[in-house]
Image: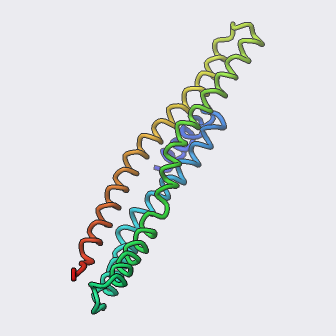
Amino acid sequence: MFDTLILSFESIGAFMDRGGPVLNLIAILLFVKWTLMIERFWFLRTVHKTNVVAALTEWEARTDKKSWNAHAIRQELVSRVTLDLRSTIPVIEVLVVVCPLFGLLGTVTGMIEVFYVMAVTGGGDAKQMSGGVARATIPTMAGMVGALSGIFASTMLKVRTNRELQLLEDHLEIQHA
């Protein structure tokens, strides 16, 4: 068991070395993105429910639900919950968009290495050139995988967020005059 774990870490380390320094940046980016996404899903299951109960309790305690003032207070309650609920979604979306750009950066740096090897050796050292090609393709793959997985998860998060906000608005009933 322990040997398998050590072997796994060595394999990951070798993969990261083959991908070059840009792959380390992509790994950090993915860690931050997934940490924020997990936090948002956790927030939906815990803190958001408390916020909704507090908003509903505050609304139900009101006797006036018809006036312009009541409408403004309702909108404020919805806005407060919306701000809490959507706070990190724009950051997540930016990180999803940046993933393939970091992959492209890895492609460019890897190809620069390939061209350097070709210039120094005259194009005859296939083994060194393959290292540059690996540094070009591995970050590209990692950036694309990170972006694709992030698109699915962030879309699911946005759909769930919008549904929760719609449910809140539906429960905060306005009485018409």
Q: Is residue 103 left or right of residue 117?
A: left
Measured along the vertical axis of the image, is residue 111 above or below residue 18?
A: above
Q: Is residue 32 left or right of residue 37?
A: right
Residue displayed at 66% across by 37% down: 21
Measured along the vertical axis of the image, is residue 85 above or below residue 109?
A: below
Residue displayed at 48% across by 64% down: 87
Residue 23 position in % (x across, y down): 60, 38
For this rendering, which residue is in front, 127 or 19?
Answer: 19
Give the quarter of the image for residue 167: bottom left
For this rendering, which residue is in front, 158 or 45?
Answer: 158
Measured along the vertical axis of the image, is residue 161 above or below residue 121?
A: below
Residue displayed at 65% across by 17% down: 129
Count of numbered labels shown in the rendering: 0
Outermost residue toward the front in this view: 177
Give the quarter of the image for residue 101: top right
Residue 153 position in % (x across, y down): 38, 50
Q: Quadrant of the C terminus?
A: bottom left
Q: Is residue 100 left or right of residue 160?
A: right
Measured along the vertical axis of the image, is residue 79 above or below residue 117?
A: below
Residue displayed at 62% across by 33% down: 105
Q: How is the image coloured?
A: rainbow
Residue 62 position in % (x across, y down): 30, 90
Q: Is residue 161 left or right of residue 83?
A: left
Residue 51 position in % (x across, y down): 38, 78
For this rendering, which residue is in front, 14 or 114?
Answer: 114
